[in-house]
């Protein structure tokens, strides 16, 4: 598998162009087509509610203003992309998550931001990363605030012998094949040999990796995974997402949610 195309949702907020710079760097690195998308409802329902009466003048004014804003986002997209030829642009008057879900069919990788706070121009903040991972059917690269590039030369793979982890390992192959060092980290009390099997599997793909086993602790699995990344100087964590039902995860907690909330490095996740 290769990353032949990537998609990045954009708006007028400052985080938008951090992730755009990062996506441009990845597109150059993998010689991929980069697609910028932007969408927002002219009269967002959370503000105007369902069934509210709004006269036609207000609707027309809001639509015109939105079209101007989408045009501004496109202008910035093309400015940042510069002379690159392998770029595309798509925009619509739709809910951002709905439009991104539709457009994900065009890409091998989706680049999203993790927001700590949001402003009025951060339309994409309504795209919840956990929900996107479940809905898009594509690997999602989650970018923490303030990060404009990812080298991915040292990678931590959070391993657990689940369908989601196996899927993500395959989705992450383009990153893994270019890495200088891959650390395969499993947090468990019992060594079932799965990390050694996965290490051999990766070796057959030309990827050398170091299996690491960590015992469970009160800090939690996500904190231990991120601790290894911090100690080893990794700037990318690869992890399968949501191995249990959403109800169970809501009640008992989730390694996925903890990673999304705590990570200070980019995370590639699939479901």
Image (tube, grey):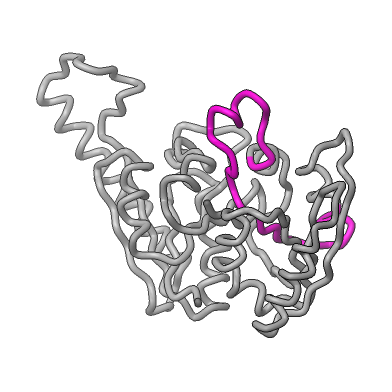
Which residue is located at x 66 percent, y 59 percent?
238
Residue 5: image location, x then y, percent = 42, 71
Residue 257 shows in this picture: yes
Q: Nearer the viewer, residue 92 or 190?
A: 190
Residue 268: image location, x then y, percent = 61, 57
Q: Nearer the viewer, residue 30 or 119?
A: 30
Depicted 175 relative to depicted 122: above or below: below
Which residue is located at x 57 percent, y 56 percent?
141
Residue 130: image location, x then y, percent = 53, 41
Residue 18 shows in this picture: no
Looking at the rendering, which quadrant does residue 75 occupy?
A: bottom left
Depicted 133 relative to depicted 60: above or below: below
Q: Is residue 244 magenta?
A: yes
Looking at the rendering, which quadrant does residue 21 occupy?
A: bottom right
Depicted 30 relative to depicted 6: above or below: below
Residue situated furthest left in the rendering: 56
Q: Nearer the viewer, residue 171 or 109?
A: 171
Task: State the extent of the magenta-drawn residues as a range.
Answer: 228-256
Looking at the rendering, which quadrant does residue 266 occupy?
A: bottom right
Q: Is residue 101 left or right of residue 8?
A: left
Q: Is residue 238 left or right of residue 185?
A: left
Residue 192: image location, x then y, percent = 80, 58
Which residue is located at x 66 percent, y 35 percent?
254
């Amino acid at each position: 598998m290769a990353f032949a195309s990537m998609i990045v949702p954009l708006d007028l907020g400052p985080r938008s162009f951090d992730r755009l710079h990062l996506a441009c760097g990845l597109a150059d690195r993998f010689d991929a087509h980069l697609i910028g998308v932007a969408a927002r409802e002219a009269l967002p329902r959370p503000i105007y509610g369902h069934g509210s009466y709004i006269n036609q003048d207000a609707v027309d004014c809001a639509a015109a203003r939105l079209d101007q804003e989408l045009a501004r986002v496109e202008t910035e997209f093309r400015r940042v992309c510069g002379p690159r030829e392998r770029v595309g642009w798509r925009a619509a008057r739709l809910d951002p998550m709905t439009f991104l879900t539709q457009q994900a069919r065009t890409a091998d990788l989706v680049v999203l931001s993790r927001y700590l706070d949001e402003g009025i121009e951060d339309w994409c903040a309504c795209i919840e990363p956990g929900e996107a991972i479940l809905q898009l059917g594509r690997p999602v690269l989650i970018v923490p605030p303030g990060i404009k590039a990812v080298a991915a030369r040292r990678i931590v793979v959070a391993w657990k012998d689940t369908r989601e982890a196996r899927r993500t390992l395959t989705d992450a192959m383009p990153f893994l094949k270019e890495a200088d060092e891959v650390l395969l980290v499993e947090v468990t009390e019992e060594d079932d040999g799965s990390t050694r099997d996965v290490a051999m599997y990766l070796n057959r793909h030309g990827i050398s990796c170091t299996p690491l086993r960590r015992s469970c602790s009160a800090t939690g699995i996500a904190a231990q995974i991120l601790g290894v990344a911090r100690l080893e100087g990794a700037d990318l964590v690869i992890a399968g997402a949501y191995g249990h039902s959403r109800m169970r995860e809501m009640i008992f907690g989730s390694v996925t949610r903890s990673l999304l909330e705590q990570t200070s490095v980019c995370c590639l996740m699939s479901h």
